Image (cartoon, grey):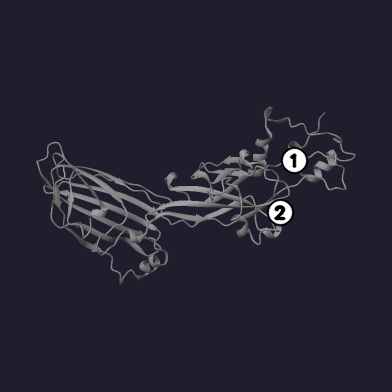
Amino acid sequence: MRKIFTTVLLFLNISFSQIDVDVTWTPYVTYYLSMFDINTGESNMPIFLAELRRGSNAPETVNINVEFEIIIDSDVLGVNNQTLAKVETIQPLPITAPVRLSNMDLNLSTDQIFDDSGQPLSLSIGVTEKIDASEMEEMFNAIVQTGRLPDGIYTFRIIITTEDGQQIIEEDVLNIANPSVHQLITPGGSLADTSINEVYTSFPIFQWESDPCNIATDCEYFIRLAEYNPQEHSSIDQAIESITRLPLNQSQGYESVGFGATTFQYPTDAGDLEPGKIYVWQVKKDLITTSGTEELLSDILVFKIKDFSPPESQSSQNNTSPADIVLRSLIGDDMLDQIFGSGGEGEGSVANGNITLNGDAVDISFVQNLISMGLSIVDEDGNENFRPLEILSIEVSE
């Protein structure tokens, strides 16, 4: 989800500040209407926490009024800058010692709060504005279906007004786009034809696409990988729930790959994925929402590790070393046989594993990554894309 955070601080008609305000907003990926009752102001999740203090030159007691408002602007619903709900103090709140106030305090049920000295303060709240349900039937139907606030721009606004006219406004403006994309890209495809979903390395790079989070720690990704055995599994769903290669610890369920990640290199310490075997994988995304952590599961992709072992009818002398596998994946079986097979220029040659890139030595795993993922290309907007390798020429030397 993309979020835009805006904080506005406005002082009007004052010669000195009677009240100082610090506001902390709680970041969420998805908002649910259940967090806020527009009829009573009741909130079951923190949206903001404000600390209110008298200014250095303020009187011993500063009387303030507090307003909290949620404003919605949504093309989906045809709503233009309309107040969803607004609650405010009916009687001034006297501030002597510092006071901590959250949206969870601003409701019809709360009649007092305490300042930092332990002194109780009388609190009287009223719902002074709310959306007309009869005019917003479409919105409420959308909320009932998903439980979430529909896509749109939401403004959470706090207004603190002192008795002498000082006014402080703080806002959190959120562009809410509920997650809709969470799909795997590579490696793999359907179980129907694993021949076109073959992978040429035992340490593939997994890649997926998902709605980005403005704050990385709002989205954590996990991967699960298991072998598909047609003798043991009746479906890929059954296979993904069986014994896993990732995570190795069967009690974990999923292997964490980090926050905000969309690629993952199969780790060398997990052991080689075996040639000729079929594997299934899935990615789980944990989102922080106002209703707690929500899990999104991707679909399941199937891939097969390419087996370069020669058929029994062929000579057992054929090389199937890691260097040979990399060479095969780069130039293909036909070209490899043409060059290194019977009558070819490189007949009898063996790949020695010495690989250079622009004159610099690189290891086999580096080339495997290039084969699996492609070349990294960054466009003028800073977006990273991967282009498949293209073989321009082949040179054989002794």
Q: Which residue is mark 2?
A: 196
Q: Crowding at label 2, few (<14), some or many (≥20) Cα neighbours within 10 Å?
A: few
Of the two numbered discs 1 and 2 in the rendering, the one whose residue sits closer to the viewer? 1
Q: Residue at x 73, y 49 (%)?
A: 276
Q: Is residue 319 left or right of residue 185?
A: right
Identify residue type, mark 2: Ile
Q: Going by the picture, which residue comes out furthest to the right?
A: 343
Q: Position of residue 151 (x, y in %)?
A: 40, 59
**Helix or strand or loop: what does disc 2 sit on?**
helix
- Is 39 drawn above or below residue 204 in the view shown? below
The total number of labels drawn is 2
Q: Position of residue 397 (x, y in %)?
A: 81, 30
Q: Going by the picture, which residue comes out furthest to the front?
A: 251
Q: Position of residue 259 (x, y in %)?
A: 48, 44
Which of the image's four quarters has the C terminus? Answer: top right
Q: Which residue is mark 1?
A: 325
- C-alpha distance separating marks 1 and 2: 17 Å
Q: Crowding at label 1, few (<14), some or many (≥20) Cα neighbours within 10 Å?
A: many
Instruction: Name the disc covering residue 182, or none.
Output: none
- Is 168 drawn above or below residue 89 in the view shown? above
Q: Is residue 47 left or right of residue 123?
A: right
Q: Residue at x 42, y 67 (%)?
A: 145
Q: Residue at x 47, y 51 (%)?
A: 286
Q: Is residue 140 left or right of residue 269?
A: left
Identify residue type, mark 1: Ile
